[in-house]
């Protein structure tokens, strides 16, 4: 299985459990790895034959930007589900980073894998 990835995708979102977090938008950072078979695209040299990371990024920017979740766990699960179902990806790894959420730590977040990796 080949991997198409997006790293350091920054999106402002309404995320958090505290009342002050419900009043502001916070920046989250996504690192995404998506299982794919790029052989057909490599042979044809045509964008139609591959998973478009631009389309994935645009969809996530729209979704996350309009979301209002309390937990990063919920948001991360929804992101993985969008990638798996809407882009027909067999396997995905999503790392969601919520910088500044814990004093003394550069970043905190969650890392999940969904689907089957061949």
Image (cartoon, rainbow, N blue to C red):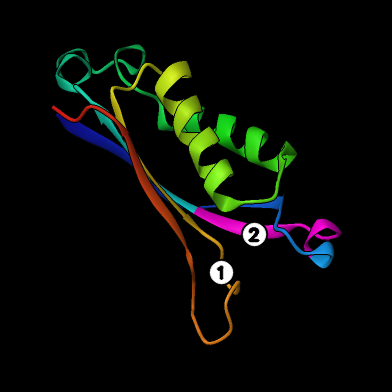
Relative vertical location of residue 87 with respect to residue 109 in this rendering, above or below: above
Relative vertical location of residue 73 with respect to residue 28 in this rendering, above or below: above
Relative vertical location of residue 96 with respect to residue 1 in this rendering, above or below: below
**Which residue is drawn at the image coordinates 14% and 19% (left, top)?**
39
Rendered location of residue 115, percent (x, y): 30, 28
* Residue 22 lies in the magenta-colored region: yes
Looking at the image, tell me whether mark 1 or mark 2 is earlier in sequence order.
Answer: 2
Contact between labelled residues 2 and 1, with CB atoms less than 8 Å apart: yes
**Which residue is drawn at the image coordinates 86% and 59% (left, top)?**
23
Question: Which element is circle 1 on?
Answer: loop
Mark linked to residue 112: none
**Which residue is drawn at the image coordinates 40% and 25% (left, top)?**
52
Q: Which residue is mark 2?
A: 27
Magenta span covers which residues? 21-29
**Which residue is drawn at the image coordinates 47% and 27% (left, top)?**
81
Task: Give how far apart the Cα atoms at labels 1 and 2 are.
Answer: 8 Å
Rendered location of residue 107, percent (x, y): 49, 72
- Packing grade of label 1 (10 A; few <14, some 14-19, many >=20) is some
Mark linked to residue 99: 1
Rendered location of residue 76, percent (x, y): 51, 43
Question: Which element is circle 2 on?
Answer: strand
């Amino acid at each position: 299985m080949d991997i198409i990835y997006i790293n350091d995708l920054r999106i402002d979102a309404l995320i958090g459990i505290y009342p002050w977090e419900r009043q502001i938008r916070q920046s989250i950072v996504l690192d995404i790895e998506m299982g794919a078979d790029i052989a057909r695209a490599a042979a044809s040299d045509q964008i139609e034959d591959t998973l478009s990371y631009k389309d994935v990024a645009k969809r996530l920017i729209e979704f996350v930007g309009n979301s209002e979740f309390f937990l990063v766990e919920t948001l991360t699960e929804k992101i993985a589900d969008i990638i798996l179902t809407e882009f027909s990806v067999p396997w995905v790894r999503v790392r969601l980073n919520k910088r500044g959420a814990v004093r003394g730590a550069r970043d905190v977040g969650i890392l999940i894998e969904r689907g089957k990796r061949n």
